[in-house]
């Protein structure tokens, strides 16, 4: 998106992920053979399939890459974009493996992609393409609740996931767990409350945890906490929108928002919901109230701010613009938004980069909860909520009678409210993101030789995957 969104990549994306892996592997003690097994992509399925559309038959190229089978099922989104190619899908599948391990989600990594611009097709055409893609996955056993479970990614959402689930179920009549073959479904079709906002919410928890570390903030010349932090977000899709919204609610100032068509800037902070509505209505982010238009969009990334959040696509901060980046913290909400060349420049400047494989793991974390819900065939909170409410209200009544004083209305509401599905999902997500940040940070701080947070995150991830192979007896 930066300079019109599609920058030519400097290197192979998968090659970059392998380099990150190898840089981190030096700080582990695992044998070379085991590291090789973790590093490579296990299965790569490239397919061409025809679909009869209004204008005639069109042949589509698509992929599904299963990177690691150390845990099953493998997991990862499906992307619809004209930039989809084998190298990209391999890189994204590998990142899924490392991402799942960092946040203790018991899946291997995978990714899928269809090389298509979804905006050029009608809804009916997209449904046909999605169903045909799914049937290609079924044919080769590249989808199933116990084998490979896709999810939304760039260019896809709950609608596509519902088509996928329905197609898979049609090929597997009577399979009781069929609905667990894909996550990110609409709540009415076996989805889970909180999944849509999950990636953005997870990014918010991750950034909040990072900026609460006094020592780290001192080094950056920043006060701890989110209050009045100047934030720039690139991408107002699902991930960018929720990230910006939650950060704003926590007191940060969203001073610029960038999209394909341009960016807008207001030093006093933009109202994220209003900008979202404005873009939906007018078709462009530009010309929002008194905000200043920034053209081209990529210039917004180079403006002075405390936290820069690329939440669109890979390769947005590269050797072309790295020198001009003024942010003190970069939160990688997208997968691979900072190239290794850019990273070298930024680390020299002392920028704290919170890496993608940790920061955007909230999506797959809640996908895991959805999958658990599908396999258990019951909504979280359904069994316990009323019972908890009864116990809590009896407790509050007894305390109020004993003390002779009433609790405030607000506190009473919080205590009496039994947890429903969304509370439990958000609580599980917060616990996951907070614990994982502290684990990777402690690994970083605990070994003076580990140069940065990304390397530390890969170290944590590699150790977990290697230990799982060792525990399984494959590599005794
Ligand atoms: N596409 C998301 C990601 O890159 C979610 C994957 C999932 O939920 O399986 O993490």
Image (cartoon, grey):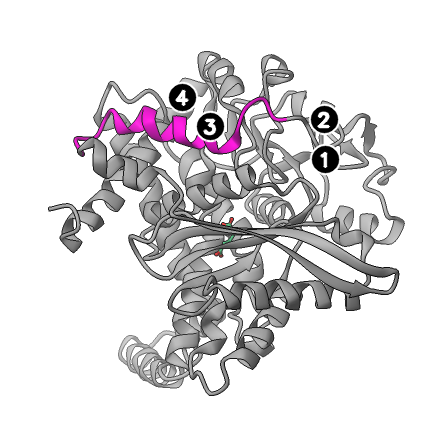
Which comes before the other along the chain, label 3 or label 4? 3
Q: Which one is in front, 412 or 339?
A: 339
Spatial CA span between label 3 and label 2: 23 Å
Label 2: which secondary element: helix
Where residue 401 appears, as percent x and y from the top left, is: 31, 82
Q: Which mark is residue 298?
A: 2
Which comes before the other along the chain, label 1 or label 3? 3
Which comes before the other along the chain, label 2 or label 1? 1
Q: Is residue 418 visible?
A: no
Query: Is 208 contained in the magenta span?
Result: no
Query: Is 18 contained in the magenta span?
Result: yes
Label 3: which secondary element: helix
Q: Which one is in front, 200 or 180?
A: 180
Label 4 CB sits under 8 Å from any ligand 1 atom: no
Q: Which mark is residue 258?
A: 1
Pointer 3 residue: 16
Where residue 186 appears, as percent x and y from the top left, is: 60, 71
Spatial CA span between label 1 and label 3: 26 Å
Asked if the residue under mark 1 is in contact with the one under mark 2, i.e. CB atoms within 8 Å, the reply is: yes
Q: Residues within 10 Å of mark 2 (few under 14, many from 20)?
A: many
Spatial CA span between label 1 and label 4: 29 Å
Spatial CA span between label 2 and label 1: 8 Å
Q: Nearer the viewer, mark 1 or mark 4?
A: 1
Q: Is residue 162 visible?
A: yes
Q: Nearer the viewer, mark 1 or mark 3?
A: 3
Is 395 displayed left or right of 267 in the figure? left
Q: Nearer the viewer, mark 3 or mark 4?
A: 3
Q: Nearer the viewer, mark 4 or mark 2?
A: 2
Spatial CA span between label 3 and label 4: 31 Å
Q: Residues within 10 Å of mark 3 (few under 14, many from 20)?
A: some
Pointer 4 residue: 218
Residue stretch in magenta? 9-30
């Amino acid at each position: 998106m930066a300079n019109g969104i599609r920058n030519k990549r400097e290197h192979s994306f998968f090659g970059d992920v392998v380099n990150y892996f190898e840089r981190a592997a030096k700080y582990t003690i695992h044998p070379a053979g085991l590291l090789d097994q973790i590093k490579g992509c296990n299965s790569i399925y490239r397919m061409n399939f025809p679909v009869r559309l209004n204008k005639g038959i069109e042949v589509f190229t698509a992929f599904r890459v299963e990177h690691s089978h150390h845990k099953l099922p493998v997991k990862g989104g499906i992307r619809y974009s004209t930039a989809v190619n084998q190298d990209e899908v391999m890189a994204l599948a590998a990142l899924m493996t490392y991402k799942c391990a960092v946040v203790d989600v018991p899946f291997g990594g995978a990714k899928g992609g269809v090389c298509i611009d979804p905006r050029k097709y009608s809804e009916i055409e997209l449904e046909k393409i999605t169903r045909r893609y799914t049937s290609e996955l079924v044919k080769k056993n590249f989808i199933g609740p116990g084998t490979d479970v896709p999810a939304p990614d760039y260019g896809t959402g709950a609608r596509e996931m519902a088509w996928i689930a329905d197609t898979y179920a049609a090929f597997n009549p009577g399979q009781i767990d069929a609905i667990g073959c894909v996550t990110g479904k609409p709540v009415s079709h076996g989805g889970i409350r909180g999944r849509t906002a999950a990636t953005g919410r997870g990014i918010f928890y991750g950034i909040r945890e990072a900026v609460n570390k006094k020592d780290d903030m001192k080094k950056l010349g920043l006060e701890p906490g989110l209050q009045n932090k100047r934030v720039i977000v690139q991408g107002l899709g699902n991930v960018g929108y929720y990230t910006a919204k939650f950060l704003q609610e926590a007191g940060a100032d969203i001073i610029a928002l960038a999209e394909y068509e341009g960016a807008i800037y207001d030093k006093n902070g933009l109202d994220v919901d209003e900008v979202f509505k404005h873009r939906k209505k007018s078709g462009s982010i530009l010309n929002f109230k008194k905000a200043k238009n920034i053209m081209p969009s990529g210039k917004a990334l180079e403006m002075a701010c405390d936290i820069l959040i690329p939440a669109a696509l890979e390769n947005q901060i590269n050797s072309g613009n790295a020198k001009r980046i003024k942010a003190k913290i970069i939160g990688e909400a997208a997968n691979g938004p900072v190239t290794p060349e850019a990273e070298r420049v930024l680390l020299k400047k002392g920028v704290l980069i919170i890496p993608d494989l940790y920061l955007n793991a909230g999506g797959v974390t809640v996908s895991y909860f959805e999958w658990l819900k599908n396999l258990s065939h019951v909504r979280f909170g359904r069994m316990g909520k009323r019972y908890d409410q009864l116990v809590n209200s009896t407790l509050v009544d007894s305390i109020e009678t004993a003390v002779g004083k009433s609790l405030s209305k607000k506190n009473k509401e919080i205590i009496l409210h039994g947890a429903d599905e969304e509370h439990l999902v958000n609580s599980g997500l917060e616990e996951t993101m907070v614990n994982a940040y502290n684990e990777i940070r402690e690994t970083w701080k605990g070994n003076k030789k580990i140069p940065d947070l990304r390397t530390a995150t890969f170290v944590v991830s590699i150790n977990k995957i290697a230990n799982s192979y060792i525990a399984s007896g494959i590599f005794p």
